[in-house]
Image: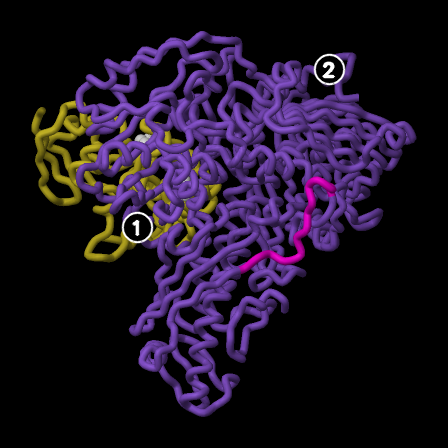
């Protein structure tokens, strides 16, 4: 297998990748690595660490308007306030006032002009957090305010963009659309989403010897924190390190959005020479950090009487906010998923990346793909309404495989049979057809309450679409007592990555899990790591750690084969023991012997994903190593008088490959689905015309609660091994399940559609009761929308 | 500054504090009991739930002075002699956590629920009773399972 090319120097027997874990940890449903500490409140987050002596606290002072020129920033009263040690502005930044990812469009602290409401303009450093926050209120800020661009339409009219437009697929789709038997067009608004990681943004900086600066940060991307702090403080990157042991949730919201707080803490530590910490409160966190992009999609589809799509235009108008941030990748991924699971013979996928005076939108689980999946599934619902078919049949007739396997961006979909089989299984296990009839009967008799049903697939491409990010490193040390120190570049944010990687290393070294100490993620241990994102972290870090383990195991085997004059084939590592021919030694004894014999007991491992060659300029190549498939069937009931609604049942079948840990994977599926459910039904972000976010706390922004989850919720894993040679033939699982919630949205459309069966439903997301009532109204109005 | 005295996890503690000090601050900053978390600061997420005189309260919106003379139990006080409380064991066993940030509050709420409603809890009751506790990771499925199992296990406890 090509994947093992990184491995070791000696001829050692290797477990083939596709096999069941040789010694019993991989593929087992083991609990999260910190489960036993979490239940005792003994797994510390950053804010729980014992404060270093002399710790100071930060509070930011932000812009009172969304757009304009700063005419006065008077901080005298702030400086004089009790407990204040320093007040810092952009003038105090020794390096570059730039926290962007290379676009140069996002300052650490605003100067001259402001870009969004609340934008940090200065930071107070004080003896306590409370004193810092009180002092920050005393600033006199005068701004020559201008009218902000807030909505997608305002930015569209002004041609305000953060990045150039981009499209792929056919250049001129007009002729194929004109040739289609039937045509339909529509428009849909799709809302953003606040991450609401339970642990808010937090960072601490500790000055070291000379100019060294150490950061502890709740970040998904420690390397980015390191590089950004070096840039801001004008330090060599080698003098800055960043550590993170665990995050209290990330979901994409701490990929770039954690950087600013770490950089502010570092700036304060640089000026005061003391450790400095910043923790945003929940309202600040809502206002000051980016969210899932919201968008408007304009679509036009050509199809035949059986619902088969012949041509389609999907055009996304995306609110990126005040800077580019991750919008290039997130919007590109959206475009890559505009086909979802369907072969679209003639497709043009376009995107406009709009700049507004709102906080810069960022990564969020799914990274653009959820909007695209929702859009194409909405089209499927509309085509089904027009052709009078069951939407599932329209989905099937368009599914990849029968008619074609080429995506609009030129990659072949090789595994569509997996997706098709999943759909067929779910159709049976959810009792789809019988339920369809039952619902028709219910709706015929019920005037106000209407039920709806939908079975929707998900196809998700795994790999960073920026090819260079598909690399990972790991580091393993053995100590003479046989204990193992493990580190890699991935961060643990609840998803269970640390446990999965530890399972892999335990099996490769043949030691019990208890022998492995999984260290915090540190930039000075494993450098230049990619963010923990893109559902690729087990693939990448698992393989890098495996390669490190194989290197060490191979050294030990070579050493033993020489010492005991046997072949390495006769040497086996399992259960904390090493069999050497007829003899059995403890793993610790072997390590001690190897140490005495001057064998190196430390190894790095590296991995880069093969086969990737996407070329954005030429719009061709392969952006993804493989696809993950899944499907969900949801049944809902809608009160058409009030818009209230409830999910009665959801059945899920999710492809996880040969799962590294089915218990952790199930957790990702359940959690991802519910997070998607929130995004599509209750979580609504409202900006007023001044660009102020009016929903900035859980009091006004509704996260799903335990009682919002479907009464019946059945999740099944599809465990067919990955066709590609991923780590133990598993598949990434972090993001795909979020899009399973599209089944709920389509079921809501189905319920509303029962009011006028041949009319496509125009429903915007999130499907709040208000949005549902608007859709219900449109059904009963003579001039139908969406056609 | 005012003085407060209370019993926290079985130990008598007293301190002179700013009267505005919240219970959660007192626990985390004065007593270094950092297992009680702050998720929202505003009484909505439940990450900060502790027991005061045997009842669940949100410590982010309770003044420490209001607990003068009270008995407080935090997540750190639930395990006895190194053995996990049955509810803690249930959350570990049934994967009732991911990032773990909500977990201490969930467990304290769950124990309170069992104290009030008994050991046999149907799923509907558990879901309704958890309305003051937000979890952003798990989708609640395993949390509900954990609470039901923990409730059962508590019957044989003590
Ligand atoms: S921190 Fe107390 S309820 Fe959220
Ligand atoms: S486990 Fe992360 S918030 Fe519940």
- Percent x, y for residue A354? 61, 23
Above or below residue A222? Residue A272 is above
Chain for numbered disc 1: B
Label 2 in the same subunit as label 1: no
Q: Which mark is residue A32?
A: none
- Between residue A155 and residue A589, name the one nearer to us: A155
The colour assigned to chain A within the rendered structure: purple
Q: Residue at x 47, y 90 (%)?
A: A566
In magenta segment, residue A489: no
**Quarter of the picture holding the N terminus of chain A:** bottom right
**Quarter of the picture holding the C terminus of chain A:** top right
Q: CA distance from mark 2 to mark 1?
A: 55 Å
Q: Which residue is mark 1?
A: B154
Task: Tell me the colour scheme of the image.
Answer: by chain
At label 2, counting other C-alpha atoms closer than 10 Å, the crowd grade (few under 14, some 14-19, many 20 or more) is few
- Between residue A753 and residue A66, name the one nearer to us: A66
- What are the residue bounds of the magenta stretch? A607-619
The quadrant of the rendered image in which ligand 2 is seen is top left
Q: Is residue B63 left or right of residue A435?
A: left
- Percent x, y for residue A29? 47, 59
Is disc 2 placed on a helix, strand or loop? helix
Q: Which mark is residue A780?
A: 2
> Where on the picture, by quarter, is residue B75?
top left
Q: Is residue A390 left or right of residue B66?
A: right
Secondary structure character of the magenta stretch overall: loop
| Tag 2 and tag 1, C-beta contact below 8 Å | no
Above or below residue A276? Residue A236 is below
Chain for numbered disc 2: A
The colour assigned to chain B within the rendered structure: yellow
């Amino acid at each position: 297998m090509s994947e093992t090319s990184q491995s070791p120097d000696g001829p050692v027997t290797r477990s083939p990748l596709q096999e069941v874990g040789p010694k019993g940890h991989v593929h087992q449903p083991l609990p999260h690595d910190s489960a036993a500490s979490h239940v005792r409140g003994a797994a510390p987050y950053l804010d729980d660490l014992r404060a270093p002596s002399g710790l100071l606290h930060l509070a930011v002072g932000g812009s009172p308007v969304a757009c304009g020129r700063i005419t006065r920033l008077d901080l005298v009263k702030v400086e004089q306030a009790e407990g204040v040690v320093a007040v810092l502005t952009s003038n105090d930044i020794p390096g570059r006032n730039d926290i962007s990812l290379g676009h140069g469009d996002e300052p650490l602290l605003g100067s001259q002009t402001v870009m969004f409401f609340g934008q940090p303009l200065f930071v107070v450093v004080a003896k306590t957090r409370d004193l810092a926050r009180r002092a920050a209120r005393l600033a006199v800020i005068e701004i020559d305010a201008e009218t902000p661009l807030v909505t997608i339409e305002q930015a569209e009219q002004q041609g305000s963009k953060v990045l150039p437009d981009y499209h792929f697929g056919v250049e001129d789709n007009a002729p194929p659309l004109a040739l289609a038997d039937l045509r339909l067009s529509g428009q849909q608004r799709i809302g953003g989403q606040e991450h609401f990681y339970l642990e808010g943004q937090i960072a601490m900086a500790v000055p070291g010897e000379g100019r060294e600066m150490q950061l502890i940060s709740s970040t998904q991307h420690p390397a980015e924190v390191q590089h950004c702090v070096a840039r801001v403080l004008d330090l060599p990157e080698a003098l800055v390190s960043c550590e993170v042991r665990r995050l209290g949730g990330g979901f994409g919201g701490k990929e770039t959005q954690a950087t600013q707080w770490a950089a502010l803490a570092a700036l304060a530590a640089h000026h005061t020479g003391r450790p400095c910490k910043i923790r945003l409160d929940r309202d600040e966190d809502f206002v000051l950090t980016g969210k899932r992009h919201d968008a408007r999609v304009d679509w036009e589809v050509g199809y035949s009487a059986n619902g088969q799509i012949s041509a389609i235009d999907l055009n996304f108008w995306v609110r990126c906010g005040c800077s580019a941030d991750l919008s290039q990748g997130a919007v590109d991924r959206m475009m890559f998923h505009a086909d979802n699971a369907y072969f679209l013979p003639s497709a043009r996928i376009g995107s406009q990346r709009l700049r507004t005076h709102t906080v810069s939108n960022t990564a969020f689980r799914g990274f653009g793909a959820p909007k695209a999946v929702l859009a194409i599934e909405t089209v499927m619902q509309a085509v089904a309404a027009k052709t009078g078919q069951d939407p599932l049949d329209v989905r099937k007739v368009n599914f990849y495989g029968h008619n074609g396997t080429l995506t609009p961006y030129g990659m072949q979909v090789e595994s569509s049979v997996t997706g098709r089989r999943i759909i067929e299984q779910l159709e049976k296990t959810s009792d789809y057809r019988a339920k369809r009839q039952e619902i028709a009967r219910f709706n015929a008799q019920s005037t106000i309450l209407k039920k709806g049903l939908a079975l929707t697939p998900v196809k998700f491409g795994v790999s960073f679409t920026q090819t260079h990010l598909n690399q990972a490193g790991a580091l393993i040390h053995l100590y003479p007592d046989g204990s193992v120190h493990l580190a890699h570049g991935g961060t643990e944010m609840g998803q269970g990555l640390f446990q999965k990687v530890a399972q892999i290393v335990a099996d490769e070294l043949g030691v019990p899990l208890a022998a492995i100490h999984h260290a915090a993620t540190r930039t000075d241990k494993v450098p230049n790591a990619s963010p923990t994102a893109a559902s690729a972290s087990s693939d990448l870090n698992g393989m890098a750690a495996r390669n490190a383990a194989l290197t060490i195991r191979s050294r030990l085997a070579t050493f033993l084969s020489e010492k005991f004059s046997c072949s390495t084939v006769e040497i086996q590592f399992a259960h904390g023991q090493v069999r050497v021919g007829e003899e059995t030694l403890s793993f610790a004894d072997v390590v001690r012997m190897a140490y005495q014999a001057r064998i190196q007991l430390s190894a790095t491992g590296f991995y880069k994903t093969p086969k990737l060659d996407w070329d954005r300029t030429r719009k061709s190549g392969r952006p993804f190593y493989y696809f993950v498939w899944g499907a969900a069937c949801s049944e809902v009931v809608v009160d058409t008088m009030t818009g209230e609604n409830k999910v009665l049942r959801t059945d899920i079948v999710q492809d996880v490959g040969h799962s590294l840990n089915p218990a952790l994977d199930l957790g990702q599926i359940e959690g991802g689905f519910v997070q998607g459910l929130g995004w599509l039904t209750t979580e609504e972000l409202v900006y007023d015309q001044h660009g102020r976010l009016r929903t900035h706390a859980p009091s006004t922004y509704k996260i799903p609660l335990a009682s919002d989850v479907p009464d019946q919720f059945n999740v099944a894993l599809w465990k067919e091994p990955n066709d590609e040679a991923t780590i133990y033939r598993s598949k990434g699982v972090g993001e795909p399940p979020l899009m399973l919630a599209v089944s709920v949205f389509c079921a809501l459309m189905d319920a509303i559609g029962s009011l006028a069966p041949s009319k496509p439903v125009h429903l915007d997301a999130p499907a709040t009761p208000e949005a549902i009532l608007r859709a219900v109204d449109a059904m009963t109005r003579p001039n139908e929308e969406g056609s | 500054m005012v003085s407060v005295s209370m019993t926290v996890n079985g130990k008598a503690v007293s301190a002179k504090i700013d009267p505005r000090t919240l219970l959660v601050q007192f626990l985390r900053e004065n007593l270094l009991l950092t297992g009680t978390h702050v998720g929202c600061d505003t009484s909505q997420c439940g990450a900060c739930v502790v027991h005061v005189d045997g009842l669940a309260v949100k410590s982010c919106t309770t003044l420490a002075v209001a607990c003068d003379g009270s008995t407080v139990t935090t997540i750190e006080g639930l395990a006895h002699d190194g053995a996990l409380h049955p509810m803690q064991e249930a959350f570990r066993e049934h994967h009732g956590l991911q990032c773990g940030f909500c977990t201490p509050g969930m467990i304290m709420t769950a124990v309170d629920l069992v104290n009030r409603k008994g050991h046999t809890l149907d799923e509907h009751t558990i879901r309704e009773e958890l309305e003051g506790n937000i979890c952003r990771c798990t989708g609640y499925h395993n949390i509900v399972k954990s609470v039901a199992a923990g409730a059962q296990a508590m019957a044989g406890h003590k």
